[in-house]
Image (cartoon, helix red, strand yellow):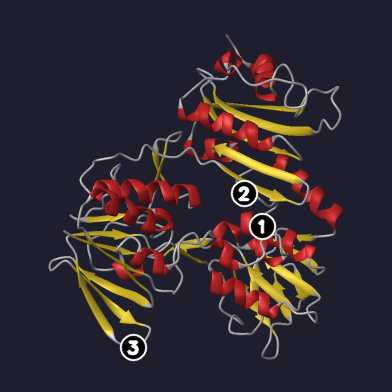
């Protein structure tokens, strides 16, 4: 049995390892466009200010390990141009300029996603960076010299906010330009105000409701042009989002979502026999909305990759879905969400209620108690949990994981009161903040 995997990162190599474990003497070929395998993309921002000492620390397994220890034909510099689904062939071009063809019995598309560049004018200027791969980050580090004073970040999502913190820690002036009225679109607007306040406190300039129009400069970027004004800059980091790498699937019959993500079933199969997809290039079933979604996160890529590998190996392991849990750090704040927010509930027409609470993350009388801010969304008719957003300086990670588990098990707001959660004054109040919210608002 010949297995071919397009993509050498989280989803692709998770699948490869499951096939290797479950299919004796399997012929596994992985095709990676770049030259680095299996690295932690989420750690890239923290190399900038030295919290992570080197990009090498982000690499889980190098190419030689996959080849020598696991017997996987792990190829680098192989860019796939297309798939012949009738002949079951993958073809493309090597970095050397030589064409290649690889036959498959089962194929996994795990090509990930690439940063979106929302404008064309001036993007060829030096000093404009995206942060998705190790080589891209190393290009940024080489460019982030002592002569760079003002850095402009385009986009206020996870990467944009994380990069704002780490660039600021390098002693640079940071400006963040966001096209909407608030950053962190996973949150509803009232909770994002805490992030805006933290940005102001730390000296990060926020430019909101500004649409990017162009970059200007002589050979190197010098100005960012928006509909809210022109801003001088020495360097730009683009972080407005990503798009699935699926252009090479044109004409194959592999069905795609509107955004280009591969549509997959619960076994990660596509609309074409013997072709699977997983990770940032694929859709993700959302357990709360009960429909296909696109929420590209490293955790999901690894899970989908593992299950795709098992299914390709004949084990028939379904992907149950996601609840959309995410968390990130911005200076002294932790920002987390799971499920759906109020905007999403309105968009899909759910009759909901929203409850808010501010509470201490541990016993209020214990030294170091910090205030966290929570918003919980429930279905109005039966109080079934739909989503939570939590912002604060401590204790956020604990609560969001409890809530994500509750979502996965379709619990109601009153059900939270029955949870036997850990309590001691240094770790919690006698009633956890989630349970405090349920006591105030839940209906028995």
Q: Is residue 193 above or below residue 235?
A: above
Q: Quadrant of residue 104?
A: bottom left
Residue at horizontal 38 percent and vertical 53 percent from the top: 14
Numbered tag placed on residue 156 in the rendering: 1
| Quadrant of image for the N terminus | bottom left
Q: Is residue 220 above or below residue 83?
A: below
Q: Is residue 55 above or below residue 336?
A: below
| Quadrant of image for the C terminus | top right
Residue 264 at least partly seen = no
Label 3 environment density (alpha carbons within 10 Å; few <14, some 14–19, many ≥20):
few
Marks 3/1: CA–CA distance:
38 Å
Residue at horizontal 68 percent and vertical 57 percent from the top: 162
Which is nearer the N-term, disc 3 or disc 1? 3
Marks 1/2: CA–CA distance:
8 Å
Numbered tag placed on residue 185 in the rendering: 2
Numbered tag placed on residue 97 in the rendering: 3
């Amino acid at each position: 049995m010949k297995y071919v995997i397009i993509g050498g990162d989280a989803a692709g190599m998770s699948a490869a390892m499951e096939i290797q474990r479950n299919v004796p003497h399997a012929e596994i070929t992985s095709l990676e466009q770049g030259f680095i395998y299996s690295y932690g993309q989420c750690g890239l921002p923290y190399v900038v200010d030295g919290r992570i000492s080197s990009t090498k620390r982000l690499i889980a397994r190098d190419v030689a390990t996959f080849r020598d220890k696991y017997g996987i034909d792990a190829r680098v510099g192989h860019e796939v141009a297309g798939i012949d689904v009738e002949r079951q062939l993958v073809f493309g071009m090597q970095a050397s300029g030589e064409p290649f063809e690889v036959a498959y019995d089962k194929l996994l598309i795990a090509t990930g996603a690439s940063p979106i560049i929302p404008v064309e004018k001036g993007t060829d200027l030096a000093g404009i960076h995206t942060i998705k791969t190790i080589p891209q980050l190393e290009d940024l580090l080489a460019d982030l010299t002592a002569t760079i004073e003002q850095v402009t970040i385009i986009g206020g999502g996870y990467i944009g906010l994380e990069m704002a913190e780490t660039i600021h820690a390098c002693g640079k002036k940071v400006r963040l330009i966001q096209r909407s009225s608030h950053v962190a679109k996973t949150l509803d607007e009232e909770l994002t105000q805490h992030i805006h306040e933290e940005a102001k406190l730390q000296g990060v300039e926020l430019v909101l409701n500004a649409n990017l129009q162009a970059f200007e400069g002589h050979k190197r970027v010098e100005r960012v042009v928006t509909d809210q004004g022109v801003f001088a800059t020495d360097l730009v980091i683009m972080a407005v989002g990503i798009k699935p790498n699926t252009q090479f699937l044109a004409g194959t019959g592999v069905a795609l979502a509107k955004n280009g993500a591969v549509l997959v079933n619960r076994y990660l199969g596509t609309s074409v026999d013997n072709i699977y997809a997983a990770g940032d290039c694929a859709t993700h079933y959302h357990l709360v909305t009960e429909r296909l979604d696109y929420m590209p996160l490293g955790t999901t890529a690894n899970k989908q990759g593992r299950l795709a590998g098992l299914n390709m190996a004949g084990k028939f392991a379904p992907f149950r879905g996601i609840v959309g849990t995410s968390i990130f750090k911005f200076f002294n704040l932790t920002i987390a969400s799971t499920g759906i927010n109020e905007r999403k509930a309105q968009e899909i027409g759910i009759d909901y209620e929203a409850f808010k609470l501010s509470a201490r993350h541990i016993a209020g009388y214990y030294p170091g108690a910090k205030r966290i801010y929570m918003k919980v969304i429930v279905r109005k008719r039966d109080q079934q949990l739909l989503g939570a957003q939590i912002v604060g300086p401590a204790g956020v990670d604990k609560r969001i994981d409890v809530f994500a588990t509750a979502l996965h098990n379709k619990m109601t707001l009153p059900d939270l009161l029955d949870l036997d959660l850990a309590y001691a004054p240094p770790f919690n109040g006698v009633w956890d903040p989630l349970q405090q919210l349920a006591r105030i608002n839940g209906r028995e």
